[in-house]
Amino acid sequence: MNTSRPPKTVSASSVQNHVYKVFPNDLNAHYTVFGGLVMSLCDRVALVVSERHSGKICVTASVDSFHFVAPAKDGDTLLISAAVNRTWSSSMEIGVRVDAENSFSGESKHIVSAYFTFVALDEDNRPCEVPDIQPMSEDEIRRYNGAQVRRDARLRTRESLKSMK
Ligand SMILES: CC(C)(COP(=O)(O)OP(=O)(O)OC[C@H]1O[C@@H](n2cnc3c(N)ncnc32)[C@H](O)[C@@H]1OP(=O)(O)O)[C@@H](O)C(=O)NCCC(=O)NCCS
């Protein structure tokens, strides 16, 4: 726990429904939205959330569980939402969700979910402390608890890979 700064709420830094309109140059050879574009959009939105929360320059440390659950197509409007799930010493897990909306009919479908870990850096580019997060709603508490399970798995994998060197 970081005692130096008061905890912040999830809503203080979250992004809701950032819009990106899909045009033909966003498509892959299958004429659906190129996955790398969606990954880049998610990384940018999650970065903004991490920088709002920490007040520091942040870098992406890892991305896991990036699931493309449905395709988006030409003309769709992508709606990107991101929020801090949990923080530790210098790192933060940001959950990202993308929906694809047909803005004529108003129908929308879930296309992507992912978890990003960002690390806040000080003036010397060293990891530095970030404020705690204060989950309030039932969903925020569920994500907060799930984030610890995911972090444990991430760090286990990181340690196993290190020991193979
Ligand atoms: C992320 C980075 C700053 C971590 O630096 P480091 O020297 O490994 O620092 P530490 O080992 O002290 O770890 C710092 C924090 O990052 C977390 N972390 C490091 N690697 C991680 C990974 N792969 N996944 C999740 N968390 C990670 C640690 O758990 C620690 O969290 P905590 O302070 O909240 O406990 C460093 O690896 C880096 O600069 N990476 C490149 C980042 C980058 O360029 N991103 C752009 C994408 S190309």
Image (cartoon, rainbow, N blue to C red):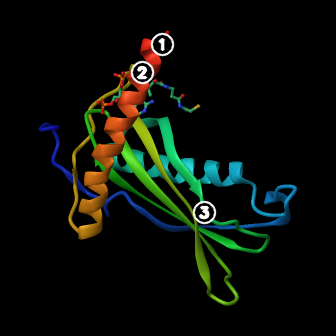
Neighbour tally class for label 2: few under 14, some 14-19, many 20 plus, Cα within 10 Å: few
**Image quarter for residue 73?**
bottom right
What percent of the width, then of the height, locates residue 31? 84, 63
Expressed as whole percent of the image width and height from the top left, the position of residue 96 reads 48, 57
Asked if the residue at label 2 sits under 8 Å from ligand 1, the reply is no
Residue 144 shows up from this direction: yes
Numbered circle sitting on residue 41 = none
Q: Residues within 10 Å of mark 3 (few under 14, many from 20)?
A: few
Please give the residue where the numbered disc 2 appears in the rendered image. 160
Q: Residue at x 38, y 50 (%)?
A: 52
Return the residue nearer the eye: 165 or 104.
165
Q: Amino acid at mark 2?
A: Ser
Looking at the rendering, which quadrant does residue 126 occupy? top left
Q: Is residue 59 left or right of residue 137?
A: right
Q: Mark 3 — residue?
A: 69
**Location of residue 1 with respect to 164 vertically, above or below:** below
From this view, report whether residue 128 is shown above or below residue 18.
Answer: above
Which circle's residue, 3 or 2, is located before the other in the chain?
A: 3
